Image (cartoon, helix red, strand yellow):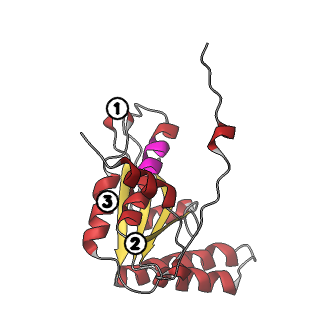
Amino acid sequence: MSYNTEEINNVIQNRRSIFPKMYTGVAVPKEVINKMLENANWAPTHKFTEPWRFQVFTGAGIQRLAVFQSDLYRKRTEALGIYEEAKYLKLLEKPHLASHIIAVIMQRDIDKRVPVMEEEAAVSCAVQNMYLTATAYGAGCYWSTGGPTFWDDAKPFFKIGKEDKLMGFVFVGMPKESLKLKGHRGAWEEKVVWVEA
């Protein structure tokens, strides 16, 4: 097989988190979302457990997600006396900045053939594939672990099992054309130890 390695390097090195406030409001074409999900399915997976599961919210589905997470936030925090109206409104309004929101779920292998860490790593690789695909197609992408990500009482809404894990949400939208984001990484050589003898 022959690949344009320079193109591949460019996509990897120019991938950026494009936050919802940087979106234009124009919907990402469904074909791009489908390609993101298809490429996610080709992530590495130990023992072929393929633990990634995705739920795509768009159109009225985004409103449904927004109302669910903001109402659950209110319920959880009012009982503890720590409710903040600003956080409630952010959970209600922020989802509408994206054309699609993809809930990222790790479905635990029923036979538990591999450690949880390996399943989480596989799902993370799947999300990276989505990120790179979005970048290649000119779409903006952002993986958030906010909202109900760590709330066990959110699991029924997403119909996920007790041992499954909600791993956040991928926000997708078309970025503003004027956006020019520079990457910031330390030198890779400083993070590598070569053992050659």
Q: Which residue, given by chain and number where applicable, does mark 1 sit on?
A: 47
Quadrant containing the C terminus is top right
Closer-to-camera residue (170/173): 173
Check disc 1 and give the amino acid type.
Lys
Q: Which residue, given by chain and number where applicable, does mark 3 sit on?
A: 37
Instruction: Read off the magenta span.
Output: 119-126
Closer-to-camera residue (1/159): 1
- Above or below: residue 53 compared with residue 140: above
* Image side of residue 57 versus residue 163, left or right: left
Q: CA distance from mark 3 to mark 2?
A: 14 Å
Check disc 3 and give the amino acid type.
Leu
Q: Which residue, given by chain and number where applicable, does mark 2 sit on?
A: 139
Q: CA distance from mark 1 to mark 3?
A: 20 Å
Residue 160 colored in magenta in the image: no
The percent coordinates of residue 43 (x first, y second) are: 36, 46
SS category of the residue bearing label 2: loop
Which numbered disc, 1 or 3, marks the residue that appears first in the sequence?
Answer: 3
Which numbered disc, 1 or 2, marks the residue that appears first in the sequence?
Answer: 1
The percent coordinates of residue 144 (x first, y second) are: 55, 65
SS category of the residue bearing label 3: helix
Q: Is residue 13 visible?
A: yes
Name which residue lies at 58% across and 60% down: 150
Label 2, residues with CA under 10 Å away: few <14, some 14-19, many ≥20: many
Number of numbered discs on residues: 3
Quadrant containing the N terminus is top left
Residue found farthest to the right: 81
